[in-house]
Amino acid sequence: MKIVLVGTAFPLRGGIAHYMALLYKHLSQKHDVEIVTFSRQYPKLLFPGKTQEEHGGAGSTVPSEQLIDSINPLTWYTAARAIAAKQPDLLIFKYWLPFFGPCFGTISRLVKRRTGAKVLFICDNIVPHEKRFGDAAFTRYAFRYVDFFIVQSGAVERDLRAFHPHARYKLVPHPVYEIFGEAVTKPEARARLGLKDEKLILFFGYVRRYKGLHVLLDAMPRILQKVKLKLLVVGEFYDDEGKYRKQITDAGLQNDVIVYSNYVPNEEVGVYFSASDVVVLPYLSATQSGIVQIAYQFDKPVIATDVGGLAEVVLNERTGFIVQPNKPEEIAEAVVRFYREHREEECVTNVREEKKKYSWEEMVKAIEELI
């Protein structure tokens, strides 16, 4: 098939760009694939990060055409003409935010009209974490021109069926990320980060309120009463960094919490996971999380909250622990149990087995079966 992927891709950065790079790599083994991405993904008003661009790095560099400005409808038409000229059989969009509904819907409509191509949406979310005016209308417009859907968790499947009862879709788990290199030994990783050889838990990824870092910080005094460890917080703040710093100071955690508040280049991601014992995701809401798939790439257990589809991927008492959201006492208990019961080796063994089902081959197979 001739396939055009439309969405966030190199030279833009972030988890969706990483996903698109891997999807491109695996689809290209059997199909003719091209990528069309954004010249501007977000207006600065809506983007709280420091930069929207990746500067190369392991696995993220793929060929793409930057044709789409998300807030300039004229570019949607020029991009649609350029895509139609490629005579694709299939357009694949990665959909996660209704903000892109008008853009994606317009491109889908125009390309389908010119070529008869089929349209497939791979949905991270149907209902966004942070709701805004127009979400339902934008999503409804985008879905009007979609032939097939892939959802990656039961939570998103339920949302899709409620929003679009007659949708043709497959449920395929989010594949494991493969672009962050090989793991290094824990002592080597800690030496590279200038950390001592002590117990270490990791919070990784963009910091937004729904990701619950403040709840994990609330749990830290309870944890430290029973287990001496460090919390490593790694990721760019899309929320007010100052209030988290104040929370750390007010709780007297300055010597127990290490904060690296920058975007992490691909080639450096592995060292943070390799250095840690367990990854903690204290989310208040979620559908799924790519962070679990990075953790699994590096054979790391995960402690996560029971929101969205996280409990479908993190198997309670096997690959980690599942706790209730917004319950710092439950997070604390799970972390303490992880160490006091010496669960790391057992969980790592189970992660290695469990992650076998999260393959890109299964994703490609699902796309082919739908079409």
Image (cartoon, rainbow, N blue to C red):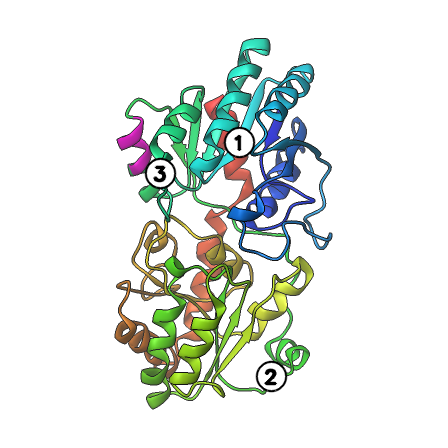
- Does 14 sit above or below residue 68? below
Identify which residue, 153 or 98, lies in the foreground: 98
**Whether residue 183 can be seen here:** no
- Residue 133: mark in rendering: 3
Is residue 29 or residue 238 the one in the foreground?
238
> In this picture, which residue range is highlighted in magenta?
159-164
Q: Is residue 42 above or below residue 72?
A: below
| Classed neighbour count for the residue bearing mark 3: other residues with Cα under 10 Å, few (<14), some (14–19), many (≥20) | few
> Which amino acid type is marked by label 1?
Phe
Placement of 238 over or under 174, stated as above or below: below
Instruction: For the N terminus, give its image quadrant.
Output: top right
Q: Compare marks 3 and 2 and give the one earlier in the sequence.
A: 3
- Give the amino acid at mark 3: Phe
Q: Which label sits on residue 195?
A: 2
Q: What element carries label 2?
A: loop
Residue 198 visible in the picture: yes
Residue closest to the far front? 45
Residue 30 occupies quadrant: top right
Q: Residue at x 29, y 77 (%)?
A: 333
Q: Do the residues labelled 3 and 2 touch (CB within 8 Å)?
A: no
Pointer 1 residue: 93
Query: Crowding at label 2, few (<14), some or many (≥20) Cα neighbours within 10 Å?
Result: some
